[in-house]
Amino acid sequence: MRNQAGTTSMKRRHFIKGVGAVAAASAVPGLAAKGESLSILVMGGTGFIGPPAVRALRDAGHQLTLFNRGKTNPGLFTDLELIKGDRLTEDIQQLRGQRWDVVVDTAAYVPRAVNTLMAQLDKDRLEQYVIVSTLSVYANFGTPGIDESAAKETLADPESEDVNQYYGALKFACEEAARAAIPGKVLTVRPGMIVGPGDRTDRFTYWPVRVARGGRVLAPGAPADSIQTIDCRDLAAFISRCVGNRTLGEFNATSDAGVTFGDVLSACRRVANPDAEIVWVPHDFLMEQGVNEWVDLPFWVHPEGELGGAWTVNTQRATAAGLRHRPIGDTVADLYAWWLEQPEERRARLRAGMSAEREAEVLAAWGRRADG
């Protein structure tokens, strides 16, 4: 049996790597009028959340420049200006002296990335810096109803850039670096679990793909258990709306309470395989069997465990600022359609979730318990 402390640390680390007194939302003094086309520098722009963000901003009529390494989806956005480089090297100096109204930063993982960027830009011209952070900045997910004022993760070693070990703490350090560099001009968006077409982690994808395989599908807990996600396209629309409205402050960007695990798996059955049999297995039994929260069954957390508040995050501020969500069934359908378009070698092995053999073992054990 695994050491309990080690298992707890592992579960939190996997969860944290998966997911962002509060400043009030306000208008920025001196900004161009709402609706006017802005010059926007997008840091990144071609990964998972980058493309929908770029499309949303472009569709809103803004003039975009991308800065990235040109390695991820290099064929995208050939109509836009690209400054090619690695922001953590001298490449960032290509931005020196250039002027933008807004920076949308989807790719800051260590505070040095923010500080070196800010050192190049005309901060007097810069009207808004949008940093895409994460709910993982919060220190305690055992408490329900986390809002933007909750305690944050901090770095044990301020010099560390170990993103695998300190993902949440480093993202919060990035936020702090941004607020220090251009106080009063920062919009901090803290997404929850981002899902939808283009997701390379396969975490949410595990569920429609597993249901498509059919048979008896191991489902954790009960159908009424809550789950919170955000579709990458809804996140992009929120970012674009906040840019257009000149919104500042800090926002938890994930779905409102109300979507359940049962909703997700019902959508998976409608989309992928109506004949699949969903077998709901209680949380405590899964724990007894050594099934790991989040790792073995993506998006599963024990409601009374250290991650028990993960799906009850307070989103009132973001909702008031215009965050909207498409139905979970639409996300599942679009994600599964995207998955089916991937090359066969990509679909041959999921990057998340338990093996068929392990699932069968747990289901068999539950069957013996139920029969007994």
Image (cartoon, grey):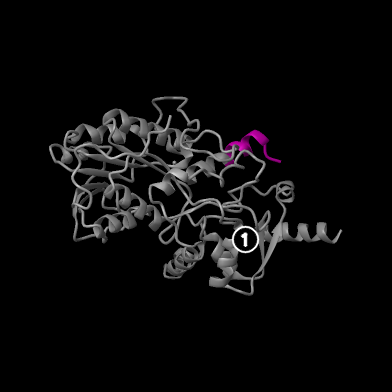
On whether residue 10 falls in the magenta region, the answer is yes
| Quarter of the image where the N terminus is located | top right
Apparent side of residue 366 relative to residue 359 in the rendered image (left or right):
right
Magenta span dominant secondary structure: helix
On whether residue 31 falls in the magenta region, the answer is no
Mark 1, residues whose alpha carbon is within 10 Å: few (<14), some, or many (≥20)?
A: many
Residue that numbered label 1 is attached to: 262
Apparent side of residue 67 relative to residue 137 in the rendered image (left or right):
left
Apparent side of residue 326 relative to residue 366 in the rendered image (left or right):
left
Amino acid type, mark 1: Gly
The image quadrant that residue 8 belongs to is top right
Number of labels in the image equals 1
In the image, residue 248 lies at what x, y percent?
A: 32, 39
| Quarter of the image where the C terminus is located | bottom right
In the orientation shown, which residue stands out farthest toward the left? 97
The image quadrant that residue 188 belongs to is top left
Q: Is residue 278 above or below residue 184?
A: below
Apparent side of residue 17 relative to residue 362 in the rendered image (left or right):
left
Of 284 and 183, the residue lying toward us: 183
In the image, residue 86 lies at what x, y percent?
A: 26, 43
Q: Is residue 138 above or below residue 372?
A: above
Question: What is the secondary structure assignment of the residue under circle 1?
Answer: helix
Q: Is residue 122 above or below residue 32?
A: above
Of 286 and 21, the residue lying toward us: 21
In the image, residue 239 lies at what x, y percent?
A: 33, 49
The span picked out in magenta is: 1-11
In the orientation shown, which residue stands out farthest toward the right? 372
In the image, residue 203 lies at what x, y percent?
A: 52, 55
The image quadrant that residue 4 belongs to is top right
Q: Residue at x 58, y 55 (%)?
A: 353
